[in-house]
Amino acid sequence: MKAVVVEQYAPIDQIALKDVPSPRIGPGQLRVRVEAAGIGFVDGLKMEGRYQTKDPLPFIPGTEFAGIVDEAPGAPGGYQPGMRVMGMTRSGALAEEIVVPPEALYPLPDSVAAEVAASFRANYLTALYALSARASLGAGEQLLVLGAAGGTGIAAVQIGRLLGARVIAAASTPDKRAFARQHGADAVVDYTQTNWRDTLKELTSGRGADVIFDPVGGEVSVQAFRSIAWRGRHLVVGFAAGAIPALPFNLPLLKGGALLGVDLAQLPIREPEVQKRLMSELTAWLVEGQLKPVVGRVFALDDFREAFRTMQTRGALGKMVVRISK
């Protein structure tokens, strides 16, 4: 099979597409023919060896995929050959085939395209878990989404609207702000402007944001927390800006605010029933048409490097997807 293979931690230009043996199926596992794989910020960090944990070399990157069950000895988890599925795994998705346990999969409705499914689960599960299970976002509350035009950010914009919040999208360019409005933001703010906190104050009638969804990090995170409402909740989702901010401890005291960590990788281990419930909710919204996931650009497998380059630029809108066919 063809697969993207990381033999040494390196920038994307040094990573190659190779012919490798198909993975063997172990006890209780099944094989999926991958149709599409999502490209996330974490995938790029893993390839360069800059993520919090390192995958042993060599490895195939990619954590999110959609495809068709090809082999399922003993029908683990009730999955049968020919069933459409979407899945999340530690690595291995940027390949024509992947072998996973049934716990990594979720049935994919026939009405949902593979490209949509490959860009859906990580972003939208992260958003719903953060906003609902962690922050208990309520109807009528003010939600500030940083990095609102990225894959996770635009998911938070849409989920926030579904939960009844008033959504303020923070993004760095006119195109990104227009993109956020197109997908449900009630208001927008340019956080590259020195007075952006004044704009946010006006938009919230002086109160500040009740909930901050933050996949960005860096100095903008500290500035956002300074504008949080009394008893507000700041969701720490990631650090796309590259810098991990240092928040003065007097700020949570003065604001009565809370920092809440959001680590999707631990959800199936620590809170599997919560994950099951949230996925059922997301899938119902998807099938009913209440939720229409945003797909960025779709690339061929041969163009996987360009997918990563596009994802890593500040001009990227939505989540990049690699279409894989055998």
Image: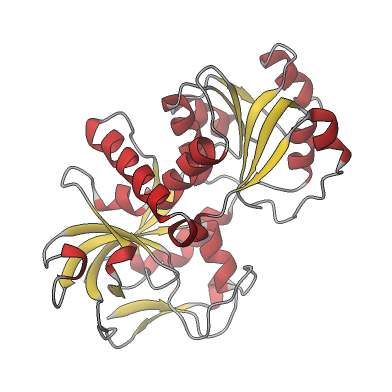
Residue 150 appearing in the image: no
Left or right of 4, for residue 238: right
Q: List x then y, in percent, for residue 302.
A: 36, 69
Residue 10: quarter of image: bottom right
Residue 37 appearing in the image: yes
Q: How is the image coloured?
A: secondary structure
Residue situated in front as seen by the camera: 251 or 52: 251
> What quarter of the picture does the N terminus occupy?
bottom left
Q: How many marks?
A: 0
Residue situated in front as seen by the camera: 133 or 176: 133
Residue situated in front as seen by the camera: 323 or 209: 209
Q: Residue at x 40, y 67 (%)?
A: 89
Q: Residue at x 37, y 48 (%)?
A: 120
Residue 141: quarter of image: top right
Q: List x then y, in percent, for residue 11.
A: 59, 72
Above or below, 87 relative to 249 = below
Q: List x then y, in percent, for residue 213.
A: 60, 38
Q: List x then y, in percent, for residue 300.
A: 33, 62
> What quarter of the picture does the C terminus occupy?
bottom left
Q: Residue at x 38, y 51 (%)?
A: 273
Above or below, 168 relative to 248 = above
Residue extending farthest top: 205
Above or below, 222 relative to 20 = above
Residue 229: quarter of image: top right
